[in-house]
Image: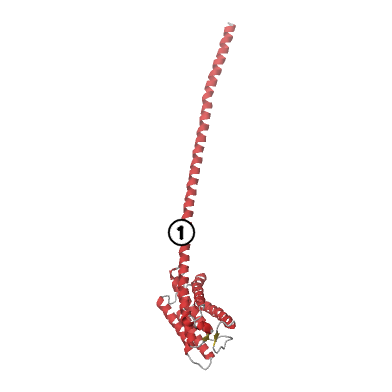
């Protein structure tokens, strides 16, 4: 009985131990199930975040490429517009230089060597391209300076006014070789008044006046150097090697070319300015 009772007791203990183990197994399985679910949720979150990051990066690359293409096209348009304006200014400057130089040669105001007088148009070949280049530079500087100062010129901005300005400039040049005064000082004062009248009538801007003075000074210095080196000469010089009215011609020419350059740049975006 004791053995059987002990055997029964051991069997009872083993049975209760097995049942305890069986009762603990679902808890372990539940624990393992919860861990796998959490890892799957974290995997889904990480994959969603990486997908959003990839889409955002793709959108940023698309936006960057669109902006770069737009900037490149705008830069190409501005460059083409700048070249077109420069060519127009160069042509106008070369043509005016050729005509006005022929007028001064016919009136014996300027004297060139004999080999120059036998060439085409009886003028030096380098005058039209040099004056055309100067006109292109000055004509492009006027609107650039206006834009830099935030004061774009709005006074008489139409082609009819520009054509009248060109006509007045040609008239001033014609007066420099046609008018007869007792001395060159009186002629210079008259042409200076006419040049200031041209600026007041068609410009009236500080930038135009400043660039006109700068153009007159630089062009006069270059002309003095050319005459000093014997490239050509002026008759009856009274301002070192040239005529005293020559800066007035350069000033009015700078204002005229500047108005042409401003009119050609009308297509650009300008800030409002009250004259």
Task: Name the outermost residue toward the top.
Answer: 1
* Residue sitting nearer the eye, 117 or 197: 117
Image quarter hosting the N terminus: top right
Give the residue drawn at x 51%, y 25%: 26
Q: What is the tally of numbered marks visible in this picture?
A: 1
For label 1, the SS is: helix
Q: Is residue 12 above or below residue 28?
A: above
Q: Where is residue 164, by image quadrant?
A: bottom left
Residue 207 appears at what percent x and percent y?
51, 76
Residue matched to label 1: 70
Q: Is residue 270 in view from this perspective?
A: no
Residue 168 appears at what percent x and percent y?
44, 83
Residue 167 relative to residue 36: left or right:
left
Give the residue drawn at x 46%, y 78%: 95
Give the residue drawn at x 46%, y 60%: 73
Q: Is residue 91 in view from this perspective?
A: yes
Task: Name the outermost residue toward the left.
Answer: 160
Which color scheme did the rendering employ for the protein?
A: secondary structure
């Amino acid at each position: 009985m004791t053995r059987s009772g002990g055997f029964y007791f051991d069997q009872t203990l083993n049975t209760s131990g097995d049942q305890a183990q069986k009762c603990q197994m679902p808890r372990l399985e539940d624990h393992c199930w919860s861990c796998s679910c959490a890892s799957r949720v974290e995997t889904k979150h990480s994959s969603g975040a990486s997908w959003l990051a990839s889409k955002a990066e793709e959108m940023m690359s698309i936006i960057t490429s669109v902006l770069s293409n737009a900037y490149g096209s705008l830069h190409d348009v501005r460059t083409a517009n700048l070249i077109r304006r420069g060519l127009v200014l160069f042509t106008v400057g070369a043509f005016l230089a050729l005509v006005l130089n022929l007028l001064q040669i016919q009136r014996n105001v300027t004297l060139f060597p004999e080999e120059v007088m036998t060439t085409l148009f009886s003028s030096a070949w380098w005058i039209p391209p040099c004056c055309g280049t100067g006109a292109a530079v000055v004509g492009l500087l006027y609107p650039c300076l206006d834009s830099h100062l935030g004061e774009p010129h709005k006074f008489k901005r139409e082609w009819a006014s520009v054509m009248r300005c060109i006509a007045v400039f040609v008239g001033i040049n014609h007066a420099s070789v046609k008018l007869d005064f007792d001395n060159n000082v009186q002629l210079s004062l008259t042409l200076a008044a006419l040049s200031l009248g041209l600026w007041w009538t068609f410009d009236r801007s500080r930038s135009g006046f400043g660039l006109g003075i700068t153009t007159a000074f630089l062009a006069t210095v270059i002309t003095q150097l050319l005459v000093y080196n014997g490239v050509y000469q002026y008759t009856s010089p009274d301002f070192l090697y040239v005529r005293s009215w020559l800066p007035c011609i350069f000033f009015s020419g700078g204002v005229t070319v500047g108005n042409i350059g401003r009119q050609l740049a009308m297509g650009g975006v300008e800030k409002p300015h009250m004259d």
